[in-house]
Amino acid sequence: QVQLVESGGGLVQAGGSLRLSCAASGHTFNGYVMSWFQQAPGKARKFVAAINWQSGYTYTADSVKGRFTISRDNAKNTVYLQMNSLKPDDTAIYSCAARSSVLFTTSPTTYAYWGQGTQVTVSS
């Protein structure tokens, strides 16, 4: 059973940084894509970034490119999202997701496994 547990969220001032972690367990993740999504209050879940677990190739949404970086530590079975130059518009619940495929997709419906999410609040 795949389990994803996020951590690292919190309250930060605009311009600040946070690093989110997603600890993955219950499976061997070679052949998986791991992604981060954000969901602001009253809005649909939105793709942020993805990483191919085996190759390390990444894909990042244009809206956060240059500010957010996804990475993984295979030895720790953990995926990270480094968020820099945070803006109030980045305020959302950030969730980690996994899909059994090497193809990047941005639609949340294509991901079978989800963590519980971690709240990120950016104050102005």
Image: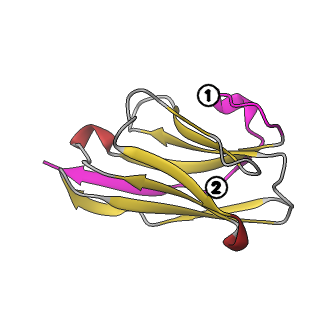
Residue where numbered disc 2 is placed: 115
Using residue 76 as the reference point, say whether residue 25 is left or right of it: right
At label 2, counting other C-alpha atoms closer than 10 Å, the crowd grade (few under 14, some 14-19, many 20 or more) is: many
* Residue found at the far left of this picture: 124
45 vs 98: above or below: above
**Total numbered circles:** 2
Query: What residue sits 77% from the left and 51% below the top?
Result: 54
Q: Secondary structure at mark 1?
A: loop
| Front-lying residue, 52 or 9 | 52
Are there few (<14), some (14-19), or many (20+) residues within 10 Å of tag 1?
Answer: some
| Residue 2 on image: x %, y % | 81, 59
Residue appearing at x 71%, y 65% in the figure:
74
Q: Which residues are magenta?
A: 101-124
Residue drawn at (24%, 48%) of the image = 85
Q: Is residue 68 magenta?
A: no
Q: Which is closer to the viewer, label 2 or label 1?
A: 1
* Label 2 vs 1, first from the N-terminus: 1
Q: Quadrant of residue 49?
A: top right
Q: Which mark is residue 106?
A: 1
Q: Residue 73 or 20: which is nearer the viewer?
A: 73
Q: Is residue 103 magenta?
A: yes
Question: Where's residue 118, x and y in %?
Answer: 48, 58
